[in-house]
Image (cartoon, rainbow, N blue to C red):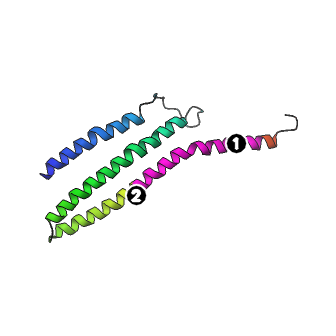
Amino acid sequence: MAADFDQEWGRKRAGSADQQVGLRLNSGPQRPFVPVGSKDFASTPAEKRAAAGVIRHELEWATKTAAEHADDATGTAHKGFDGWQTAAGLKKVADSRDQQVKTLWGRLSSEKVALRGVEGVFARNDTGVGSQLLKSAPNGV
């Protein structure tokens, strides 16, 4: 029974969400690899916003759904093994997994914020460099 569940869950998880996210993230025009230092190695603000959207609307939801599903399954198993040492082991595994999910959730959130904020960082850097160049330019230029 557990093996059937694992196979079914694995097919559902790998079959839809992973492929959809991969397609969404890689659906734009494919650019050849450009060596470091090249002026063409960049992504557009729209691509960054799209990646942040995938994190917000797909990855965070999928992470939450998978964690809830695992918690439900572990809770059911824990009740079935009540009074056995296996129940204590399941509780320890569930606590560890919950901590890992919180860590993953935090990383996803950080990446989402960074992707959304990078456009402003670049604009501030450009403005700052422009101001420095104007201040250092000789008079009359």
Total numbered circles: 2
Q: Tag 1: Cα neighbours inside 10 Å, few (<14), some, or many (≥20)?
A: few
Q: Label 2 belongs to which residue?
A: 103
* Mark toward the start of the polypeptide (2 vs 1): 2
120 with respect to 30 (left or right): right
Q: Amino acid at mark 1?
A: Thr
Asked whether 72 or 90 is in front, the reply is 72
Quadrant in the picture for the C terminus = top right
Q: Which residues are magenta?
A: 105-133
Q: Label 1 belongs to which residue?
A: 127
Q: Where residue 112 appears, x then y in whole percent?
A: 47, 47
User: In the structure shown, which secondary structural element does the residue marked by tag 1 occupy?
Assistant: helix
How far is disc 2 from disc 1 in space, using C-alphas? 35 Å
Give yes or no for residue 99 being in the magenta stretch: no
Q: Where residue 80 appears, x then y in whole percent?
A: 14, 64
Q: Are dots 2 and 1 in contact, CB under 8 Å?
A: no
Q: Amino acid at mark 2?
A: Thr
From the image, give the main secondary structure of the stretch colored magenta: helix
Q: Residue furthest bottom?
A: 83
Q: Which residue is pictured at 33% across the width and 60% down the height?
A: 98
Q: Where residue 81 appears, x then y in whole percent?
A: 14, 66
Q: Using the image, determine if residue 29 lies above or below residue 81.
A: above
Give yes or no for residue 115 being in the magenta stretch: yes
Give the number of the disc on residue 79. Answer: none
